[in-house]
Image: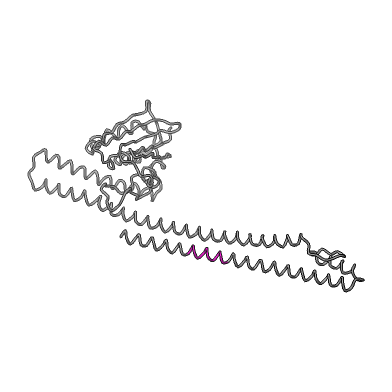
Amino acid sequence: MAIRRRRLQIKVALIFTFVLFFLGAQVFWWMIFLSSHINQSSGARLDGWKRDQLLFQQLLQEQPRLQPQWLALCTKNYPHLLCRPRGIVIRKEALLELRDRGHRSMRMFMYESLFFVLMIAGGLVLLAQSIRAERELKTRQSNFLSAVSHELRTPISTMRLVLDTLQYRELPKDKQERYLGRLRANLDRLHATFEQVLAAAMLEEHGQTKPLETKDLNGMVDSYLERHRVELEERGGVVSLAVSPSELQVQMEPLGMEIVLNNLIYNAIKHNPKSEKRVSLAVFESGRYGVLRVEDNGPGIPVAERSRIFEPFYRIGDELNRSSEGLGLGLYLVKSLSERMGGSVSVDASEEGCRFEVWLPRV
């Protein structure tokens, strides 16, 4: 599949290259043709002026008595000639004007040709970008469907196996509790998957969240950690929180903020291969905003992919060699929900971890 996609990309690139080369060749030929045509027109005009010059010189020599009349006629009707009794010559001003007129015509056609080339090339570039964006969107949507299938099939299969084990085998109490814990973890995974999909669908279809409420950002984050601390520790997360010295009232939508926290914290743990997955949370105020900062000690984000991590369905890495779970909607939801709540999100990633900051307007 990847080889076919690569071959298609090469074919499209060759076609666009040929079109641009053909367009450039056409413009080059057109410029040569126009230059030749302008030179021929200027040469014909100059030959006509020389014939006029010779004609009046002959008239002055053959009919000296009518010299005043011929000079008056020359001056009146042939402004390109300098008519004097001692001789007829072509005016330097006329020669300069003829040359400048040719240059102006050449520049005009050149600029028009360049504008035409730029318009066509710009249209081709936009078309190529549109085709590429459409192809990438289809690829990401296909990957999304595969990820959804995996995220649904894996926990369902695991839960079926656990239920069959509990139903048909007598197990000690400690094993029963361990199996029930696995069952709950997979249920939570299914619930998180549905929450991600439903939240993304709500944003895409309705373009809005529930009405905003005034909440203490300190209390919101602390309450979230209290409810999820055990599960985070089971996943290997070591989460710390530094709260603001005083209450920090901000505008938020509680469910949306829950999704933001869930994605930032679980992403920091899920994509961290280290045994100690440290996640540091800090809540503080900055001007008119309350800020939630989430830092981790993971591998960071490659520079080439930092500008795309907030796109829907986009997941870092190779889809063919993917080991981590996810749908590619987490950071898209973080950005979209933060903006729906009147705030924003920023990322500062290095080779030794990531730092996300969610900015929400204070009350």
**Can you give x and y, in whole percent of width and height, for residue 333 in the image?**
36, 45
* Total numbered labels: 0
Whether residue 93 is situated above or below residue 340 in the rendered picture:
below
Tell whether position 24 is magenta: yes
- Side (left or right) of 104 relative to 190: right
In the image, 341 versus 304, the foreground residue is 304
Question: Of helix, strand and loop, which mostly describes the magenta segment?
Answer: helix
* Furthest residue in direction left, as rendered: 170
Colour style of the rendered protein structure:
one colour
- Side (left or right) of 71 relative to 362: right
Q: Quadrant of residue 240?
A: top left
Whether residue 248 is situated above or below residue 64 in the rendered picture:
above
* Furthest residue in direction right, as rendered: 65
Image quarter in which the C terminus is found: top left
Q: Residue at x 37, y 55 (%)?
A: 137
Whether residue 344 is situated above or below residue 60 in the rendered picture:
above
In the image, 349 versus 172, the foreground residue is 349
**Can you give x and y, in whole percent of width and height, for residue 304 in the image?**
38, 47
In the image, 197 versus 325, the foreground residue is 325
Extent of the magenta region: 19-29
**Can you give x and y, in whole percent of width and height, for residue 236 in the image?**
23, 37
Q: Residue at x 70, y 61 (%)?
A: 99
Q: Residue at x 34, y 60 (%)?
A: 5
In the image, 73 versus 184, the foreground residue is 73
Image quarter in which the N terminus is found: bottom left
* Furthest residue in direction bottom, as rendered: 62
Tell whether position 256 is magenta: no
**Can you give x and y, in whole percent of width and height, for residue 176 in the image?**
12, 41
